[in-house]
Image (spheres, rainbow, N blue to C red):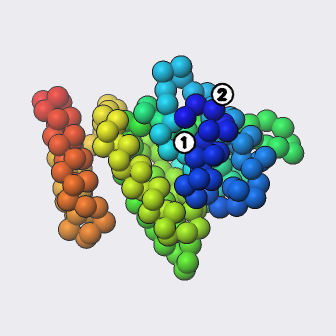
Amino acid sequence: MRTAQEMLDYCIENDLGHHVKDTQIVYVSYFDVIAKYLKPNENVLLAFSGSISEATFIALSAFAFLSNYAFALTDQRILIGRKAVFFGGEFFFEIPLSNLVGINMHVKNVTAFVLFDTITEKFKVNMWDIDIANRVIHECNEIMGTYATPTAPEHARNPLDDIRQLKELLDMGAITQEEFDTKKEKLLDLYKQSI
């Protein structure tokens, strides 16, 4: 996918957003922001919409009162976009896919949130529906397994500590054995490179 319309159509066809079908003209402008910042060799693999309820990145905080956003996972990055239709301006934020550490779900009452944890940022996306959140998490994990290669900033923790944390998540049932094995292998490769 490369165009805003393709991303919107994907989102609608796969039911990956709340009220997207009813407000297509608004959401196509959100996905247009993402399309504008795509690199020539980059392809969108997953497109969805949701509202950000918590975020650690400062760039978003000033714009967060406008709650609904377009999201895209490409073969290189996580992209977040929104156009302020009534106020003008736009918001765009990117996170390298290699910085993605994990994706989990949090359910509060009947609302499902997808929690994105990266090396430098954390954010929680309200998906409203548990089934939609599960599908987004599944697709994100598939993309991570195929395209993400961990990178370590200078201040990164010891990869062996991360493996211990992953084991705790596995024991709690928060991740599958396959997810554990994939992430463990990447962390061990990272550890070997650091010694």
Q: Is the residue marked by circle 2 packed among few (<14), some (14-19), or many (20+) residues within 10 Å?
A: few
Residue 87 visible in image: yes
Residue bearing the label numbered 2? 36
Among the two numbered marks 1 and 2 on one chain, the one whose residue lies closer to the N terminus: 2
Secondary structure, mark 1, is strand
Say if 54 sits above or below 118 in the image.
below
How far apart marks 1 and 2 lie (CA) works out to 12 Å
Residue at 59% from the left image edge and 67% from the top image edge: 128
| Mark 2 residue type | Lys
| Mark 1 residue type | Ala
User: Is residue 189 shown left or right of residue 97?
Assistant: left
Residue 78: % across, % down: 50, 39
User: Is residue 166 shown left or right of residue 58?
Assistant: left
Residue 4: % across, % down: 66, 36
Say if 39 sits above or below 145 in the image.
above
Which is more toward the observer, 122 or 48?
Answer: 48
Residue at 61% from the left image edge and 57% from the top image edge: 17
Which is more toward the observer, 54 or 92?
Answer: 92
Secondary structure, mark 2, is helix
Residue at 49% from the left image edge and 67% from the top image edge: 131
Specify the quadrant of the image occupied by residue 16: bottom right
Marker disc for residue 38: none
Marker disc for residue 72: 1
Q: Seen from this angle, which residue lies furthest front?
A: 13
Total numbered labels placed on residues in the image: 2
